[in-house]
Amino acid sequence: MDEKIWKELLLKNDSKIVFLIMDGLGGLPRESGGKTELETARTPNLNKFAAEGICGVLDPIYPGFTPGSGPAHLALFGYDPVENNIGRGVLSALGVDFELTGRDVAARLNFCTLDAQGRVADRRAGRIATDLNEKLCEKIRNSVQLPPEVEFFIQTVSEHRAVLVLRGEGLGGLINDTDSQKTGVPPLEPHGADEASQKTAKYVAEFLKQVRELLKDEHPANFVLARGFAKYEPMTTMEERYGLRSIAIAQYPMYRGLARLVGMTVPPVPPTYDDMWKQLKENYDSYDFFFVHFKKTDSYGEDGNFEAKVEVIETVDVWAAQLRKLNPDVLVVTGDHSTPAVLKSHSWHPVPALLWSKNARADQVSQFGERSCSQGYLGRMPMKNVLLVAMANALRFQKFGA
């Protein structure tokens, strides 16, 4: 939809919109005719919201496309995920509160283990402890020297993950990953796809050369692999775009970075689900839109742990019961994509969704699950449209046309 159309229809009011997102929510049965993780879970509270609201399924990108978490979340926030395909490096940097500028190119780093022949033996260096990561980053920070026209910053994320930021004039972010995502082969060399990115790739190559020498006697983390190079380009904020004062209640760095990218307030990391509830309640009067993110549904899906994913959904269902105390004007419960445990990966399957509002025209769906949601009034829609539907139910649009 043309942004000019709905921006002219925006209305301001005091309505509250809550998006409860279970990352990787969609699933698949373990056997033909069986139930998915969501259908297996005991979800009396979400079922009640579904029975009182409307349901459907969402395509994060296009039907048949398997999405990454970045574009899928931007679609949830109403941004076109293809036009706004942000590199993971930028999201990771924002997720650790790094203040990016328009002169920056960012990349995710994995500390890894190289064997004696220089081949990747472990892409994650045994998932080293975060405190070791911090020591290695400090060692690199104090020892690596690049040409004076470019600065570099390296910052720990957690375990084996870190962020690299290069800052200088005329840098480009179209650089290949040096991580082939395979073991038994050497890391890839960085190459730029255009002149500005070739300039950046030379700095990256020099950085990696020095890091390799510096860490050669370390174990198990004796090198780094780089992924998700991207140049930082500021985006219009949720408030500029929709008139929504927005806040993110999220634990995992990447999703905090996504929220910060679109101008949401991102308070300190809430360590527990109880802390997430406390954070939501304490900020409820100050904001219009609340992005509440649960990660473990995706993590256990990627681990292939069907039972653990079911347990997380059941825990979130108990947590969701508290939302009735806040009485939001609109509640949307969905995921950013499907991560079936049987596939151990993101998948192309549409994501079940429910929208609860006193202004919703209730359908016949009484259970929150993939098959039941596919029968609801929301139908099958692009994920980027669900925020507009939520805003309509919050009475935040005026009539179009005479």
Image (cartoon, rainbow, N blue to C red):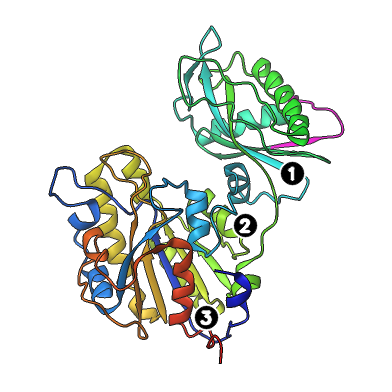
Task: For marks 2 and 3, give the one nearer the viewer.
Answer: 2
Q: Quadrant of residue 13?
A: bottom right
At numbered mark 3, what does the secondary structure look like: helix, strand or loop?
helix
Residue 291 appears at what percent x and percent y? 48, 65
Examine the structure image and report whether residue 68 is included in the region drawn in magenta. Answer: no
The CA span between labels 1 and 3 is 36 Å
Q: Which residues are magenta?
A: 143-153
The CA span between labels 2 and 3 is 23 Å
As drawn, the label of residue 261 is 2
- Give the amino acid type for the residue marked by disc 1 in the picture: Asp
Residue 302 appears at what percent x and percent y? 35, 40
Q: Nearer the viewer, residue 361 or 224?
A: 361
Residue highlighted by disc 1 = 104
- What is the tally of numbered marks visible in this picture? 3
The answer to the question of whether label 1 and label 3 lie on touching residues, with beta carbons closer than 8 A, is no
Q: Nearer the viewer, residue 313 or 383?
A: 383
Residue 243 visible in the shown view: no
Side (left or right) of 275 relative to 71: left
Q: Quadrant of residue 190?
A: top right
Residue 229 appears at what percent x and percent y? 63, 38
